[in-house]
């Protein structure tokens, strides 16, 4: 057992003899939480907890000293300014984040920054073990409490991407918006013409303009895209 100059590194068990195992550094400002994380992870015989640290400074020291395969950390520490440079310095290191609450935007941001797993701190011990296993295999684990809202956000983003052409709706004239509203109700050109007391040729002209402005080739594509908004 050794300690860093700051007294933050608790155990040093990693070394040549740990080859093939999952070498881990734990980062959390609360000593009891760190002890609990260690206790859970060491139930997995493949895990070697190389160090425990309490803050940002300890994080850099421990990661550079032990080059862990998985870094398990509190979400606030991962959000520190020095986190991303460390990820860039150790590209093979995967990250597991523990959080009580996390916004969809933050979650998406974390997943784009080497974070492989996000664990609900109020979840069961098996979730943490599964998350570390997944991270060590470069797979992804997201706690079910966070995954549902995330998928809803992903679906919204996918629809937004699919509707990039529909962002041009702002360029439609008031009359074209009226026509579009009836188009997405599934009305034919004749039905729209009757509803707006216009000629069918005029409606065809408006529909053509709408398709041109939104970038869709057919009214079916337009209706399908609008329906997913």
Image (tube, rainbow, N blue to C red):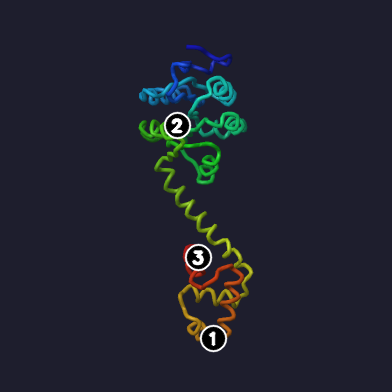
User: Which residue is painted at 46% across and 74% down in the image?
Assistant: 185
Q: CA distance from mark 3 to mark 1?
A: 24 Å
On screen, residue 178 versus residue 42, left or right, reads right
Mark 1 or mark 2, earlier in chain: 2
The residues bearing labels 2 and 3 have C-alpha atoms spaced at a distance of: 39 Å
The local secondary structure at tag 1 comes to: helix
Q: Position of residue 134 (x, y in %)?
A: 42, 35
- Near mark 2 (Cα within 10 A), the count class, few <14, some 14-19 or many ≥20, is many
Task: Judge whether 74 appears above or below 221 on screen.
Answer: above
Please report whichever mark, 2 or 3, sits nearer to the chain's N-terminal start: 2
The circle on residue 136 is 2
Residue at horizontal 48 percent and vertical 34 percent from the top:
97
Q: Which residue is mark 3?
A: 225
Q: Nearer the viewer, residue 138 or 226?
A: 138
Between the residue at mark 1 and the residue at mark 2, the CA separation in whole angstroms equals 63 Å
* Closer to us: 196 or 142: 142
- The x and y percentages for residue 179 are 54, 77
In the picture, the disc for residue 200 is 1
């Amino acid at each position: 057992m050794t300690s860093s100059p700051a007294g933050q590194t608790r155990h040093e068990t990693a070394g040549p003899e740990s080859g093939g195992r999952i070498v881990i550094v734990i980062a959390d400002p609360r000593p009891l939480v760190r002890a609990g994380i260690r206790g859970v992870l060491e139930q997995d015989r493949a895990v070697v907890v190389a160090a425990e640290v309490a803050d940002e400074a300890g994080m850099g020291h421990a990661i550079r000293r032990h080059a862990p395969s998985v870094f398990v950390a509190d979400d606030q520490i991962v959000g520190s300014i020095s986190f991303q440079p460390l990820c860039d310095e150790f590209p093979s290191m995967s990250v597991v984040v523990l959080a009580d609450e996390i916004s969809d935007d933050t979650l998406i941001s974390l997943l784009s920054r080497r974070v492989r797993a996000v664990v609900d701190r109020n979840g069961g011990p098996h979730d943490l073990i599964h998350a570390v296993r997944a991270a060590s295999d470069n797979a992804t684990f997201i706690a079910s409490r966070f995954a549902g809202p995330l998928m809803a956000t992903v679906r919204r983003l996918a629809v937004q991407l699919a509707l990039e052409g529909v962002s041009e709706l702002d360029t439609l004239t008031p009359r074209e918006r009226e026509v579009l509203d009836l188009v997405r109700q599934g009305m034919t050109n004749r039905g729209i013409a009757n509803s707006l007391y216009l000629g069918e040729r005029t409606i065809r002209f408006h529909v053509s303009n709408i398709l041109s402005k939104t970038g869709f080739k057919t009214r079916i594509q337009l209706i399908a895209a609008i329906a997913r908004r």
